[in-house]
Amino acid sequence: MLPEACVANILAFTSPVDTFSSSKVSSVFWLAADSDYVWEKFLPSDYKSLISQSSDHNRSFSSKKEIYRCLCDSILIDNDRKMFKINKFSGKITYILSARDISITQSDQASYWSWGNVSNSRFSESAELKTIDRLEVKGKIQTGVLSPNTKYGAYLIVKVTKGAYGLDLVPAETLIKSTNGQMNKNTAYLCCLDEKKQQMKRLFYGNREERMTITVEALAADGKRREPKSRDDGWMEIELGEFETREGEDDEVNMSLTEVKGYQLKGGIVIDGIEVRPKCLIPNLE
C-alpha cells in the first residue's frame, strides 16, 4: 500500500474527476483525495483574489476542497457585476458578465430600456427592451482570466416576453474577435420562429422581410437558421461564437450581437448578460 502523501502527490497530477473517483478505492485514497495539497492544485491560481472580491468574502472555509465546491456553485464578484464558477469535474473556468457589465445600445435611456430584478436571474438587475430600431450588444473579456488551451463559446443570455415584437423579422449579426487575430462571424435570430406571427408579418411588411433576410443570411456560416436555445436555468441563449485560449497569452476578446439592418422597431427581449464557458465539458453531475 502506497503512503498517503505519495498517493496525494499522484492525484495532484490528475484531474478533479479522477480524484473524486479514486476516493472510493480505499481509505488511503479517500484521505489523500481529501487533502488540501491535492485540491489547491485544482483551484484557480487567483482563487484568493476571487474570494476577496466576492459578495460573500467574509465566509470561512475549513478546507481547500470546500473552497473548490464553493467555486463550483459560483460566486458573484466585481461588485456583483460578474459571476465566476468552475466545472466540478474538469476545473475549467466560466464567467458570466451581467447586463450592467456589458454595453447595450442606449440602455441608459428609460424610453428604450427598463432595468429591474427578473425571475431566475443571477444578478440584481437585467435589462428589458421597450422599443428600439438599432440593437447593439457588446462585451469583452481577457483570456488570461480563463482556463488556458481551451475552446470557449460566448452566449448572450436572454428571455423573450409575451408581448415581444420585431425580433424574428431579420437575423442579427454575431461576432467574436480577439487581439491575436481570431475571428468568428455568424447570424442568429433573437427569438424562435412562430409560424402564425410570421404569416401576419408577411402581410404587414410585404416582401421587405424576405429581402432583408436574404441579405443578412448571406453572412451565415452554415446557411442554417440559428435561434436561441433553452437553458436549464429558465433562460435562453444565443451563441455569439467561439475562440481558443492559449497558455501564457492574455488577449482581449470582443463579443457582439448587432441588428441594425432591418430598421424595424423591436421590443420585448430581456438581457441578463453574456456567458463565456468552455465547450464540450464533462457534465456537472452530482
Image: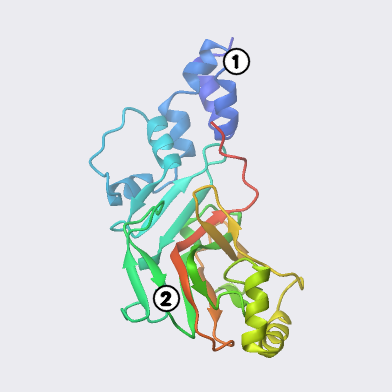
The secondary structure type at the circle numbered 2 is strand
Residue drawn where x is 58% and y is 64% of the image: 238
Nearest-to-viewer mark from 2 and 1: 2
Colour convention of the picture: rainbow
Q: Amino acid at mark 2?
A: Ile
Can you say whether 232 is above or below 242 in the image? above
What is the quadrant of residue 58 in the picture? top left
Can you say whether 216 is above or below 145 in the image? below
The secondary structure type at the circle numbered 1 is loop
Q: Nearer the viewer, residue 16 or 136?
A: 136
Instruction: State which tag comes first along the sequence, 2 or 1.
Output: 1
| Image location (x, y in percent) of residue 218 | 74, 82
Can residue 245 be seen at all in this image of the molecule?
no
- Please give the residue where the numbered disc 1 appears in the rendered image: 25
Q: Residues within 10 Å of mark 2 (few under 14, many from 20)?
A: many
| Image location (x, y in percent) of residue 128 | 40, 69
Callout count: 2
Residue drawn where x is 57% and y is 17% of the image: 24
Q: Amino acid at mark 1?
A: Val
| Image location (x, y in percent) of residue 180 | 58, 72
Can you say whether 3 is above or below 45 in the image? above
Residue drawn where x is 62% and y is 53% of the image: 279
- Please give the residue where the numbered disc 2 appears in the rendered image: 104
